[in-house]
Image (spheres, helix red, strand yellow):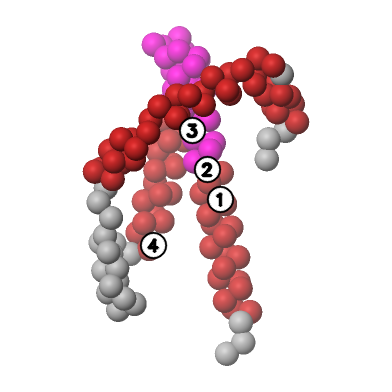
Amino acid sequence: MLPLTAIRPLMSSAGLDALSGALPQTQQMGPSAVENLKALAPAETVTGPGSVAPSSGSFSSLLGQMVQEVNGRQANAGAMVRELQSGGNVSLHQAVIAMEEATVSFQLMVEVRNKLLESYQELMRMQV
């Protein structure tokens, strides 16, 4: 949820003008944008409950891959901050963006973990 201080600039006339200026751009996309998206990833059809295709990996390997990706983002952000502190060829913007990407990735991972744990606990509470 956005804090009230983040919403106030949108309520000003300049904020409303910026939002209304973006509306014609989205309307100009038209049906051709949707057709382009359809061409990128063709939809697969499902024929019934028994037709689930086997996945290429297990769920635990998928989670492990996600954790490794978050760890990589955090390591990258740490390296960029160290290089910035030592006067390397990294701009402040790049370092802050890398830190925010790592923070958001970590927060998402924690929320997914919380949901998985909550679901597991709900399953354990079910009576058979």
Q: CA distance from mark 3 to mark 4?
A: 23 Å
Residue 82 seen: no
Q: Residue 117: horizontal and vertical position, in percent?
A: 57, 64
Q: What residue would you read off at disc 3? A: 101
Q: Is the Cβ of the residue at disc 4 closer than 8 Å to that at disc 1? A: no
Q: CA distance from mark 3 to mark 2?
A: 8 Å
Three-letter code, disc 1: Val
Q: Is the Cβ of the residue at disc 1 closer than 8 Å to that at disc 2? A: yes
Q: What residue would you read off at disc 2? A: 106
Q: What residue would you read off at disc 4? A: 60
Q: Residue 56: horizontal and vertical position, in percent?
A: 25, 61
Q: Residue at left 56%, top 44%?
A: 107
Q: CA distance from mark 3 to mark 1?
A: 14 Å
Three-letter code, disc 4: Ser
Three-letter code, disc 2: Phe
Q: Earlier in the sequence, mark 4 or mark 1?
A: 4
Q: Residue at left 39%, top 54%?
A: 64
**Magenta highlight range:** 78-106
Number of marks in picture: 4
Quarter of the figure with residue 63: bottom left
For the C terminus, the quadrant is bottom right
Question: Tag 4: Cα neighbours inside 10 Å, few (<14), some, or many (≥20)?
Answer: few
Left or right position of 27 against 39 = right
Q: Residue at left 65%, top 14%?
A: 14
Q: CA distance from mark 1 to mark 2?
A: 6 Å
Q: CA distance from mark 4 to mark 2?
A: 18 Å
Q: What residue would you read off at disc 1? A: 110
